[in-house]
Image (cartoon, rainbow, N blue to C red):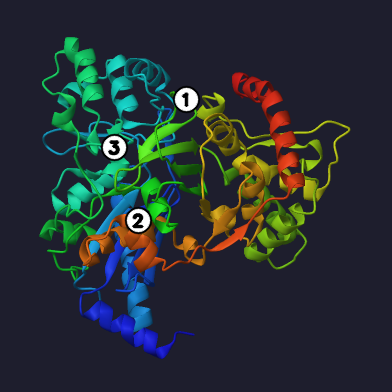
Amino acid sequence: MIDLNMSQNAKSTIESGKAILGIEFGSTRIKAVLIDQDNKPIAQGSHEWENQLVDGLWTYSIEAIWNGLQDCYSNLRADVKKLYDTEIEVLAGIGISAMMHGYMAFNKQEEILVPFRTWRNTNTAKAAETLSELFVYNIPLRWSISHLYQCILDNEEHVKDIDFQTTLAGYIHWQLTGKKVLGVGDASGMIPVDPETKTYNAAMVEKFNALIAPKGYNWTLLDIFPEVLVAGENAGYLTEEGAKKLDVSGKLKAGVPVCPPEGDAGTGMVATNAVKQRTGNVSAGTSSFSMIVLEKDLSKPNEMIDMVTTPCGSLVAMVHCNNCTSDLNAWVNLFKEYQELMGIPVDMNEIYGKLYNNALKGDTDCGGLISYNYISGEPVTGLAEGRPMFIRSANDKFNLANFMRAHLHASVGVLKIGNDILFNEEKIKVDRITGHGGLFKTKGVGQRILAAALNSPISVMETAGEGGAWGIALLAGYMVNNTKNQSLADYLEEVVFAGDAGVEIAPTPEEVEGFNTYIKNYIACLPAEQAAVNSKK
């Protein structure tokens, strides 16, 4: 039931052109959120999609990207029509976000040279290793510079024709506005960013150009990389052509200001009010990552920890895991099939709720059971490919509660391995960590599991479920509504969240000890997972 006054206010906001649109391309869903002047969601749209494994590389086709965007926006229009009986014609601002990193290279004719290579690909090990040594800085496999240099190492023919290289968010933004720009957070996944200059690290750019000089390409890195912008800056306007690409109905008018395009890590930080130093957030869905905003740089590079930035350029330690809930969801679907087989009506929310809550009744160490949720490779633990695997011995306590708890532990197990380095070795201090994403949908369960993993209180906000599309809408709002010229951190704290810190759960000593035992067994059995990868099926 929609409150009549709220409905009228939202309709007025849309018709007066004061609504702001955020769109995020996630791994399995493209989501659009429309917000009002109070930063509250008033309508949404979505489109489900899946990556494809083509010639050994994970990709989404250009056709899938545009079909998905247009269907998502059409879905949003339908929601607006249903709720408010009106059309979106003018907007106050737009923001585009997408999964970070990967490789999209274009020639002078704006044609993509090879299929989009996503963050999920792990074929860039040699490039990442070489660049990490060259820069004396951890360069992850999924970063854009790793993909580019791997193409060079592999003597791929297309490299000589590159005129522009960007991320998925940067590509969509370019097509909608004509501007080859990128938000600093997303740019920090192209090549490291200098927190002082808030643009690409000049020394590393120079080293890379010197490294590839013998190849004789007619470009250098800054010739082909997008310009870097920080939160709050104008990143162009929706063009006539861009408006038609977004809204195939032709209703949406051009001229809308667009904020710098960002990666899903940056929008996650915004959506959880975690851009201040000593705050952090964990996003847990298809993949998972933690973002801890640092007071100073780490003592040394570590291949498990990526150094990126907030959308305003502050240094962030990121632990990125390729796998999170996909394998867990597959097991839950098995219980769904059993329920259907028994002729029992299926309610997926009920199934998740029952199984997740029952998991909390299990032993804190999962009774010795271990799960590896590796649908794809996992760089943090050194696995180039994935093989989902469940391990138990005859003496382990094999029951449903421990079984589900083992899979919940697995969903954040790799995340724990990386964060143990930050908290135990680097002695990083954090005042608040906020969780968001699908793992936290069942109230209190994923939150408690993560708290045990990180040995830290975890907060979850009611708004965190809105996700990255809401986060990029907030960044667009910051660009057009920041009348007091506040910093992004102050704007979020005082205007958007107004002191709302969410609901916090702290782990018990027994839960922390149990997870530590689980992860010790998990690490000890990693050779079995590696053996499964080695034995090609």
Which residue appears at 27% of the width and 64% of the height? Answer: 477
Residue 334 appears anywhere in the view: yes
User: With respect to residue 376, does 214 lie above or below?
Assistant: above
Q: Are marks 2 and 3 in contact (CB under 8 Å)?
A: no
Q: Residue at x 32, y 15 (%)?
A: 134
Locate residue 130, reporting x and y percent. Answer: 36, 15
Q: Which of the pair 365/112 is nearer the observer?
A: 365
Observer-nearest of 331 and 201? 201
Q: Which residue is mark 2?
A: 489
**Callout 2 secondary element:** helix
**Furthest residue in direction bottom, as rendered:** 4
Give the amino acid type for the residue marked by disc 1 in the picture.
Asn
Measure how far apart labels 1 and 3 are at the Cα level: 18 Å
Q: Is residue 3 left or right of residue 111?
A: right
Secondary structure under the numbered disc 1 in the rendered image: loop
Q: Earlier in the sequence, mark 2 or mark 1?
A: 1
**164 up-or-down from 78: above or below:** above
- Determine which quarter of the picture holds residue 491: bottom left
Kindly identify which residue carries mark 3. 195
Q: Residues within 10 Å of mark 3 (few under 14, many from 20)?
A: some
- Which amino acid is tagged 2? Ala
The quadrant holding residue 137 is top left
- Lower position in the chain sequence, tag 1 or tag 3: 3
